[in-house]
Amino acid sequence: MANAERSGRPAEAFGATAVGSTRTPSRTPLRMTCLALWLIVAALAARQVTVVLGTPRGERLTDLETWVGPNGVLHVTGSLYHSTRFTGTPFGGLVLKPLTRAAEQALGWGWTFGTLLLVVALGLIAARALPQPIGRRTALLAAPVAIGLLMLSLPVRNTLWLGQTSIVPVLLVLLGCFVAHGQRTSGLLIGVAAALQPTLLLFTPLLWFTGRRRAALSTGVAFAVCSGLAWTAMPHDSHTYWVHHMAGVGLGGRADDLGNQSLHGALLRLGLNGPLEIVLLLTLGAAVAVLALRRAVRYFDDGQLLLAVAITGCAAIVVSPAAWQHQLLWVLLAVVGRAGRRASDRYVWPVTVVLVMTLPARMMLPDMPSLDPLRTNLVLVAALAAATAVPFLSRTSPHYQSPTPAEYAPAAPARFRHIPLAPFLRRVLTRPNLLLELLLLRVTYAAYSQVRLAATGGSISAGRAEAEENGRQILGLERALHIDIEHWANHTVVTIDWLRNFFDFYYGSLHFAAPLTVLALLYWRRPADYRWARSALGIATLLALVGFWLYPLAPPRLMPTLGFIDTVHGVQDFSQPDYGTLTALTNQYAAMPSLHFGWSLWCGVVIAVLARRWWIKVLGLLHPLFTASAIVTTANHWVLDAAGGAVVVGAGFALTYLLSGPRAATAAAAERERTPTRKPVRS
């Protein structure tokens, strides 16, 4: 058949893969890495089982528990859809009916372990379906990586928690595309999947236009038979689902709920409704379906069969009336597509997909009103991009296997014999991908905020006693060193209005603005130095998190008996466990070390080292001086907090130098000195 000729695959299945290898990496490290990944997968599976089955009954497997009862699939008499808890098709309800006589506790255990086995099967099939050629390393590591990503993804975690069946249709489609022998069997499996999730009928034209017309006909027949069987057994429920609910619109909650990541849900959240919304939905949905199918057929002809399947699944998410979070695995499968001709661009798409599918949307984008439409539809945007917009490379492209490499600085020797330079900190001279940098910066800061808050046990009151005791220790040490100037400085500045206003403004305005400005200028004007400076800042912030965790410290303004005046946040209510509204948002006891001073010192050092004019260097060094004055006079930090900030920043620069060597410019100059140019010899 045509697809067999184009892709080199058997005509009776989308993808019976053979492992090709062009390189033979060292076997022992590769096997150790593979073993480590499988151990991580086992740990993730054990954690999922422990979390789900360790939760009290009534709070776990909530969907499954509503399906099991003496009166049918649901704990109700009459229609399946008297409750919004059941969102499946009538055929799905018919399949679940035999479970009503199962022992509920045994069913919960079996369902959890059975779902894990389905996830493993899904990962194994996806790993075997990768487009050829792939190396030995990829062939060995693909399965544990795929299964691990599936375990971490929000759809699988929600499926395990709720007791859902959303993995089954995805697995049936992959079985039909890559495992089943014979087009009829393939079409039968995909047709049953469509009977469970009707928008998967979108695979029928994919089969048809890729030359598998017998499979396409079998899909339609299997869907019609399954749906007809359910209509015969449950005519009232079938009428309710297909006619009253218009193929499931709104089942499981309001259709404009944030969990509904379909085009229909997005239009409703944007305020559109009625005939205008329906016309717009049909028009845009048809355009997305046509464009996605054309792209899927093209990548199928190119031999990227798994990508073609993922694109079609993403289109099914977009056009579905209701696509709840546990039904969105197709987006994760689209990670196999390769986009970007340069090496610095190659990881943008896979990193974006993995983050979108594993982290809450609030961690991906800041809580700003202007970003609400994007944040509330983030998974939909990813599905829409995969289906219609991302320029995935063809296998015939010279950049598919070998993207344009980055330009590296001259190699530097390791500082110590037993501490090799870190490969991921190699000194690249070209600037990294901006989108990837912004994405990782946002996610890193969101994780930093979560860890910072968790350092007090998840609430401010949980760490209050220890933080105040540590505050008394710091004050005692400062008195012994005769540097306890906080009270004097605080009360002196309060009496001078212009100075107080200046330090309040400096404290509240430049903490984030200054380092972000420095990073932006380095990215645009000094890309090689940007990586060096960014790494030092990241390491310093990571070390500061350790300090917050090990040593919670109350700043002077939160020491209730010492008489400090909080000039920035105002009077605090010490009768409450949490001091004011701000303390509900962040850890107010993350004072040691002071990142206010640490980040300002980082700015000062970077400017002093890299600036060409002396007066810019002076201004850069004045910034940490003003910041130190601001954090002390506003009673937000002790003097020793600034010393702690200086320590972590110094450690950040030192570790960056230790792991990546000197800056690129320094290394290049040293290389020129070692190999001076020879003068030409006259004859």
Image: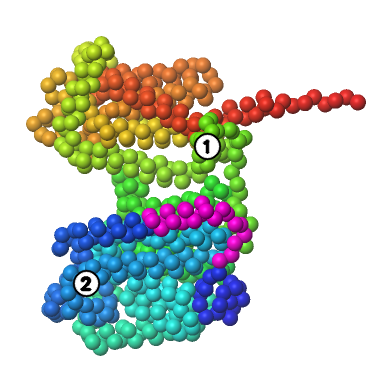
On the picture, is 258 further left or further right than 14?
left
Q: Residue at x 15, y 19 (%)?
A: 562
Tell me where residue 431 appears, x and y as whole percent: 54, 39
User: Can you tell which mark lies on residue 567?
Assistant: none
Label 1 secondary element: loop
Q: Residue at x 25, y 11 (%)?
A: 482
State yes or no: residue 437 in magenta.
Answer: no
Q: Is most of the magenta stretch helix, strand or loop?
A: helix
User: Can you tell which mark lies on residue 107?
Assistant: 2
The image quadrant that residue 144 belongs to is bottom left
Q: Residue at x 33, y 21 (%)?
A: 643
Tell me where residue 133 appears, x and y as whole percent: 58, 63
Q: Nearer the viewer, residue 339 or 130?
A: 130
On the picture, is 417 further left or further right than 505?
right
Quadrant containing the N terminus is bottom right
The image quadrant that residue 20 belongs to is bottom right
